[in-house]
Amino acid sequence: MSYDLIIENGILLTADNRQSIHPKGLLCIRDGVIVYAGPRDQAPEPLNAKERVDARGGIIMPGLVNAHTHITMSLFRGLADDLPLEEWLTRHMFPAEAAHVNPETARTGALLSCAEMLLSGTTCFCDGYFCEDAVAEAVAKTGMRAILGHGIIDYPAPGVPDPKDNVKAATDYARKWMGKSGLITPSLFCHSAYTCSPASIRQAKKEADNLEILFQIHAAETQFEHSQSMKEHGLSPIQYLDSLGVLDRNTLVVHGVWVDSQDIEIIAKRGSAVSVTTHSEMKLASGVAPIPAYLNAGVRVGLGTDGPASKNNHDMFREMSLTAKIHKALSLDPTELDASTAIALASRMAAEAIGLGAITGSLEPGKKADLIILDTNAPNMTPLYHPESAVVYAASTDNVRQVFVEGKCLVRDGRLTSMDMDKILAQAKILEQSIGGKGA
Amino acid sequence: MSYDLIIENGILLTADNRQSIHPKGLLCIRDGVIVYAGPRDQAPEPLNAKERVDARGGIIMPGLVNAHTHITMSLFRGLADDLPLEEWLTRHMFPAEAAHVNPETARTGALLSCAEMLLSGTTCFCDGYFCEDAVAEAVAKTGMRAILGHGIIDYPAPGVPDPKDNVKAATDYARKWMGKSGLITPSLFCHSAYTCSPASIRQAKKEADNLEILFQIHAAETQFEHSQSMKEHGLSPIQYLDSLGVLDRNTLVVHGVWVDSQDIEIIAKRGSAVSVTTHSEMKLASGVAPIPAYLNAGVRVGLGTDGPASKNNHDMFREMSLTAKIHKALSLDPTELDASTAIALASRMAAEAIGLGAITGSLEPGKKADLIILDTNAPNMTPLYHPESAVVYAASTDNVRQVFVEGKCLVRDGRLTSMDMDKILAQAKILEQSIGGKGA
């Protein structure tokens, strides 16, 4: 057999549904697809390849899948923190978005986030924002895999000045990107039930169903939202979405923090998925989403970082680590949400949650070769008794050395190969000046 | 004026008690001591120096102070995770310690931790463990600043086979290291009230007082410990320590998770300090220490990482970030524990908590030049509107480029200058083989 690429001499952490680990693992890749993933000594000989990558004893694992982002919002990273949600949104985020988001700035923000995500080991993400056509154009050039959802909100928004065009604008975008790129999948993203009318939500979901694409919506994020929903509809946010008939297997509920067992049962029954952004939800004081309960109910769950204006970075290693720890701390049970589960939530299960489970999220024959190699020859990764524990509890973004998407190397020895980082940083710094802040 | 070292062209984050920030800051250093720390344009001319460091627009801030570690336990990093505390301790940690901790291995574990701490921006730490004489010898050579506490426990321990020698062994060690090194300060560390008799605790505290050194003790870490203390003594762990007369300004209470308002009042009245290890306490499912309540009561608090067998790394950036977020999430108040406070807890306040507040922890004239420079020319640090927000919510250990202790450069461009990292990693990997694990 002859391959395009062989990756060898590493600990292979497959993140398959048995979370198989091969201490002496081997990956064989042809046409961007994994042909073999397993122990080196069981690989079918001969092992000829155009290119061989020596993992040097490091950990070979799936590229991380970020199940919820607003990548353009990197422009507003750290613009306003430690503030009440209302003040943060209405006095900082909304004015900044109205004044500064356009296709040109969206492109810069998107590239800035892609650079950060790739360098920190993320190969695939699920986004939602405005000016998403410009975002898609930018992302397509980076070589990353993404689901890019066009925002829908019943207020004037960047690129959609008149809200009555909101579903049409989003659908036009989605149509344009259907099948246009093997790496980019369009989606529709209704902001929330408190910013979109029932008609907008129903219409958006109908269009998403017509196109057979993912429908995303923020829901059950805060206590305030929950109590407002109870007051207005007599229904929890999840019950309300269910009453609109928009919960099914192609719907991704974003956040899902304020849910009770009945809500979880509804989500499970409808087959919807949930993306959880642990850091962001804690930082905005929304609370903690009950991931163990979702998993017990069989709900597909993926971790995400949220927009960099609320979490401030795209570090998925921290999402794994904190997600494992917060549920131990809250339950006072140190066996809750173990390292293996945390990895799955940021790889295979995240891919399944966003509808890309057949394509990415684990290292198995037939899936695309989206993977990363972690350097273990570093103090924080030494000694290394259990690779999953090392990835979740000890590793940091420093340890990411190589990143591949569809077998193409996008980060080599910790440096981007497909992007001009200096140029992106320079463009972002120019925007920093115009967006301004009260700090340095 | 002529200086040994001038650091220029950076944002100076002093962490003084007003948390002063100078966007165009300058640091002037002579004989390892800060002579000037302030705006460049107010510095006394002329500015001659033997060496000038260009911070290139980065953030110049105090070296981070880790207020609680067991650095030798890096040998057991990730050996056993996601387990019930009892099983973790009795089936993994205690046997591993008994079999593998000796002066030689302690040296390797200590150096491994020092390498990790320096590379991640920590310049000073407060430790407690056994074979601490060997640890002190190793640490002294790295150029780091440390308080090194010899462990005291009423069981056979590494280097102290007979518990009846425990206080004497620790005191002999402390005497040996009194004034021996400008960077190393000895301390006595009673493991806990459930592993040390009242006589051991009182005697150890008396010896610490004689030597005028810090007395450390784990207390109020778990719910189990609290209920046992109530059962056995009719007192909470803090009340019990107070009944022994060992709480005063030279006592550091480690963890302090299971405390009520009365306990906090006792700690405040006695002037004792508390070190909190947020990640470790969450991972071991101990709970969350009420830092805001401690601060309101005027208690000195510092953040720490705990031993790498329970937290798994020494990343103080994550401690700042998580500490800020967990208290927002628990209080549902996003203004709780802001970025500025989080930085203080990992620098000036941590130094004050461990008794080194006059020497390190902030960049002010008269203090030692213990500092780090963060690279801000990185995607996760761009844009940069508020330096404190960037440090706490966006920065990671990748961003640490230069580290100085007493004006001496210990990390230059992300590489250790005082240690042979390859040699340390090789030694640790040999120990990994003998300690073994059930994983890779």
Image (cartoon, coloured by chain):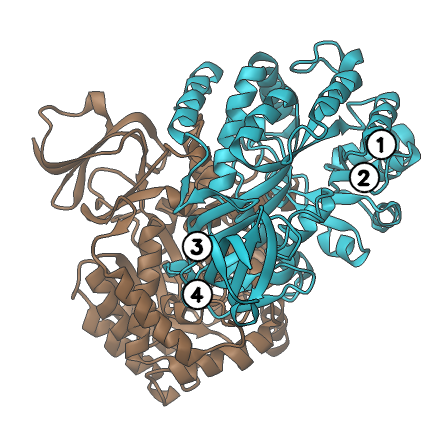
Chain colours: A brown, B cyan
Give, as a three-letter code, the residue at label 1.
Asp
Label 2: chain letter: B
Give, as a three-letter code, the residue at label 2.
Asn
Q: Which residue is mark 1?
A: B209
**Which label number is shown at residue A307?**
4
Q: Quadrant of the N terminus of chain B?
A: bottom right
Sequence-earlier tag: 3 or 2: 3
Viewer can see residue A264: no
Q: Which residue is mark 3?
A: B53
Viewer can see residue B50: yes
Same chain letter for marks 2 and 1? yes
Left of B397 or right of it: where is B200? right
Residue B19: percent from left, percent from top: 64, 63
Marks 4 and 2 close (CB-CB < 8 Å): no
Q: Residues within 10 Å of mark 3 (few under 14, many from 20)?
A: few
Label 3: chain letter: B
